[in-house]
Amino acid sequence: MVKKQKNKTKSSPISKGMIITVAIMAAVVAGGVYYFWISAVPVNVDHPVFQTASNVYILATHNDQGYYYDEQSTKTGKKTISSTNVNPPIHIPKGTLVALHVINEDKDTGSDQDLNIDAFNVHTRHLKYFEAQTINFLADKEGTYPYYSLIHPEMKGSITVDP
């Protein structure tokens, strides 16, 4: 009597679904690493800077005397209403990673706003009302540098990088 042997194929412990799942997970991790690496590169240097950024909030607005920048305090979280803070000078220690947050708060005229610091390659896009843009830069050069608006020439101030 001859027994028929069943043609058994060995199943692999790694299935096609598992390979696809691992490939997707690897792609997601690689994308996350790429995003983290790119977001850690400030606009004025060509390498990542892994340190906690110092936040500077600049509000672009206007009053009856014209357009101006105002600085929002990071200590109290409140905007200063006094006219002593118009186009404020900003002081930053050398070597600081700065996260510059520019916010258009000009609700009355609806005018676009911008901010530029040529010395650190900081140039915001034209911001509509209540739009914001954050730009990271490394304060790597001592000195005093102007910041200004291309849209409203009267909006200007200075940033000083202290030793």
Image (spheres, grey):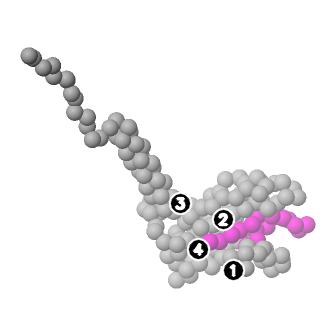
Q: Residues within 10 Å of mark 2 (few under 14, many from 20)?
A: some
Check if mark 4's residue and mark 3's residue have beta carbons within 8 Å: no
Please provide percent x and percent y for residue 155: 76, 65
Determine the residue positioned at 49% across, 62% down. 40
Left or right: 19 in relation to 133: left
91 shown above or below 63: below
Residue type at mark 1 is Lys
Tell which circle, 4 or 3, labels the residue nearer the N-terminal end. Answer: 3
Real-space Cα separation, disc 1 to disc 2, in angstroms: 15 Å
Quadrant in the picture for residue 104: bottom right
Per the image, label 3 sits on a secondary structure element best described as loop
145 shown above or below 2: below
Residue designated by label 1: 75
90 shown above or below 22: below
The furthest residue to the right: 64
Real-space Cα separation, disc 3 to disc 2, in angstroms: 14 Å
Real-space Cα separation, disc 1 to disc 3, in angstroms: 26 Å
Real-space Cα separation, disc 4 to disc 3, in angstroms: 15 Å
Residue designated by label 4: 54
In this rendering, the label closer to the viewer, 3 or 2: 2
Per the image, label 4 sits on a secondary structure element best described as strand
Residue designated by label 2: 101
